Amino acid sequence: MRLSLLDRSRTRSGYPEGDALRHSVERAVKAESLGYHRFWGAEHHAVPGIASGSPAVLLAAVGARTSRIRLGSGGVMLPHHQPLVVAEQFLMLEALHPGRVDLGLGRTLGFTAPVRRALRQDADDVETFAADLEELRSYLRREAPVTARPVTGTAPSLFQLATGQGLVTAARLGLPAVIGGPVLHSPELGEAVAAYRRDFQPSAEAPQPQVIISLDLYPAETQEQARELALPEAWAMARSRETGEFSPLEPVEQIRQQRWSPRTTSRVEKSLHRMIGGPAGVVVPAVERLMEVTGAEELVASTSTYDREALAGMDAELMRMML
């Protein structure tokens, strides 16, 4: 099983927002030294808690500081871009860092209505997404009427971020599927993955179905310590449902001093319940169960917390646990 990291370039209370990008690059350098297979960057627009709006730019910086780890987008939100532009960006990455580039694609819209308007994006159309993805693939294969440049000896590997309908599209287009979020905790998970494998149409990029799962993992000495590490992310998510703003990560002590409404408490507990954390005796069996249900070949840890030293420790501990 391959281990990878998804880093959302989370901003932190008390730090300039730009530091989040430098922190991401530093984390990627350490991840390479630990033996992680792939480093994924994310795309979020006009979100106070996330500094990365362009995975291609972040991955270029990561590639310049590393030599082996694969560079992945988790992912580029294709509805926000022209397929030719995405092809050019990732062919540039491929030219700069040959054989290391992965292009993960999603179709999530902007976080709020004003952001969606700013992105000129107001509809979630599965068929348009599929058509755009096919067009993008034609540029990477050099089968389109125009040639995306630079021309490279190899093309970036394609993946689809898939939840629900995304698995259907990934099967139809013959793409590896990256599964994360609530669907991993759904009783229909096994059935959905089985349908993906059954309906998969082989392609030049993927002759066989391939599944990657993305999880919030918090390795720690105890489950209570894992809950404390997960609290900043759970708090930010819960508060976003009330304020409409996904805020920077805050220290645990600062969170504990704030007023918690019953609804906030419930939402925080729901998030903490979904994460997998604690000692190896808890984390490893939980991961193994999901790997067995999905037949996944790769695990992506999407862990984040306020304390960067603790985050580095979790990255190292997870690698030790899963080897």
Image (spheres, rainbow, N blue to C red):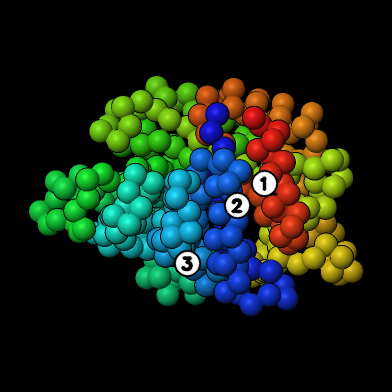
The circle drawn on residue 30 is 2
Question: In the image, residue 33 lies at what x, y percent?
Answer: 58, 46
| Tag 3–tag 2 contact (CB < 8 Å) | no
Label 2 to label 1, Cα distance in Å?
A: 9 Å
Under circle 1, the secondary element is helix
Crowd around label 2: few <14 · some 14–19 · many ≥20 (10 Å): some
Q: Viewer-nearest of labels 2 and 1? A: 2
> Where is mark 1, residue-wise?
315
Task: Name the residue: 16% across, 48% down.
Answer: 142
In the rendered image, the vertical position of residue 297 relative to residue 96, given as above or below: above
Under circle 3, the secondary element is loop
* Front residue of this view, candidates 263 and 304: 304
N-terminal label among 3 and 1: 3
| Tag 2–tag 1 contact (CB < 8 Å) | yes
| Tag 3–tag 1 contact (CB < 8 Å) | no
In the rendered image, the vertical position of residue 188 relative to residue 307, given as above or below: above
Q: Viewer-nearest of labels 3 and 2? A: 2
Label 3 to label 1, Cα distance in Å?
A: 24 Å
The residue under label 3 is which amino acid type? Gly
In the figure, is residue 24 to the left or right of 144? right
> In the rendered image, which quarter is residue 243 located in?
bottom right
In the figure, is residue 192 to the left or right of 266? left
Question: In the image, residue 87 lies at what x, y percent?
Answer: 27, 56
